[in-house]
Image (tube, rainbow, N blue to C red):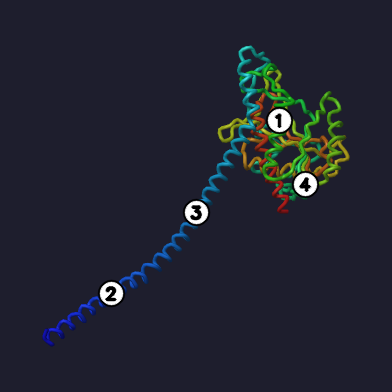
Amino acid sequence: MSRRRRRTRRHGRKTLNLNKFAFLCLILSIIIVCGVFSVPRKVFGNAKEKGVNKIYTTEIETVKSEAEKNKNEIQSVSNIMSNGYSDISKAEEGAKELLANASNDGKILSEDYSSKNATEAFGPVYLRNTTKNNGVNIESYLKKKITASINKNKPVVLIYHTHTSESYQIIENDFYSNTLVASPQTLGIIRAGEALCNTIESYGYKVIHDKTVYDTSYSGAFERSREKISDILRENPSIQIVIDLHRDSITRKDGSNVKTVTEIDGKKVAQIQLITGCEDGAVTDFPNWEKNLTFALHLQKSLSESYPRAVRPLLFCARKYNMDLVPCALNIEIGTQSNTVREAVYSAQILGKSIIEIIKECEEN
């Protein structure tokens, strides 16, 4: 083989080797370049995805938690409603079965007493003054502060019933029936007291509800209730508001019975009457009666503004009715003997909300 051919062959092998080397370098470069861009992208991309997933997971868990909370709240409200009226509904169903054979003991007249017999008024606040020697300037009393010191961690309100056996009709009807009178022990004034107590407690305030029966005989009932609630007040000096909850009775000369009623949010509601007294004539030893009147007028104003026509004129009279025991004590009547239990319970809830407004007003003062 000639020298020239050997040189050419060696040069060809060098070129081939160089081409292989260049090709390998190119492949390596591609791998390195791809690695530089793809590996970090993958690493950071996964980190980002993990972060996003973590955020999404947290948000999903939060939404789920809120949904569960809302579900529980809805169930809680539902339970309150069903528990709050299930006993009344059951009694109503039973009364409907007895209706055909029920006794007719007098016609029922539904009347609005929201301003009836009022002697004085200031804005929406109506008052009926039956005293001989005490005038009432409603506006001036509303400017006064209520005498009460609220401790939310201890009992604030006492509810009791001097006339514990006062009852209501079970179902709405155009005639009064002794056959359809609700049981005083379960669906009478005590039942309205339970609704009032539950409403106030739902706002976080403590209430004592005394269900002692004081009217085993009508005579002496106020003396018996005074003895018991005096003991309760001594044991619970934090109590600032005392409510003796009653039910009124209105019967006309012709035997017709009157139910004091109005409608709020599509529901029939038994009208409420606040009663407060004073020193006048034979009534003595009632030095704080003006503080009671101040409390009564503030509550009357709250009811009148929030629930127009749900409250009758405040009755201001020469009576004591155990209201001398604390400066914020009232007798309150919910409806009459012809109102239904359901109407009375609605009223008690309305009353409770207005009492809460007064309590909060006292806290601010």
Q: Which mark is residue 154?
A: 4
Is 24 situated above or below 47? Answer: below
- Relative image position of residue 261 (x, y in whole percent): 63, 29
Q: Circle 4 sits in a helix, a strand or a loop, which is it?
A: loop
Question: Is the C-beta separation of discs 3 and 2 under 8 Å?
Answer: no
Does the rendering let one see residue 334?
yes
Q: Circle 1 sits in a helix, a strand or a loop, which is it?
A: helix
**How many C-alpha atoms fall within 10 Å of the one at disc 2: few (<14), some, or many (≥20)?**
few
Disc 3 versus disc 4: nearer the observer: 3
Q: Amino acid at mark 4?
A: Lys
Marks 3 and 2, how far apart at CA = 47 Å
Disc 4 versus disc 1: nearer the observer: 4
Q: Amino acid at mark 1?
A: Arg
Marks 1 and 3, how far apart at CA = 49 Å
Q: Circle 2 sits in a helix, a strand or a loop, which is it?
A: helix
Is 169 situated above or below 55? Answer: above
Disc 2 versus disc 4: nearer the observer: 2
Marks 4 and 1, how far apart at CA = 23 Å
Marks 1 and 2, how far apart at CA = 95 Å
Question: Is the C-beta separation of discs 2 and 4 under 8 Å?
Answer: no
**How many C-alpha atoms fall within 10 Å of the one at disc 4: few (<14), some, or many (≥20)?**
some
Q: Which mark is residue 24?
A: 2
User: To which residue does mark 3 refer?
Assistant: 57
- Relative image position of residue 282 (x, y in whole percent): 87, 34
In-front residue for pair 204/62: 62
- Relative image position of residue 105 (x, y in whole percent): 68, 15
Pointer 3 or 2: first along the chain: 2
User: To which residue does mark 1 refer?
Assistant: 191
Q: Circle 3 sits in a helix, a strand or a loop, which is it?
A: helix
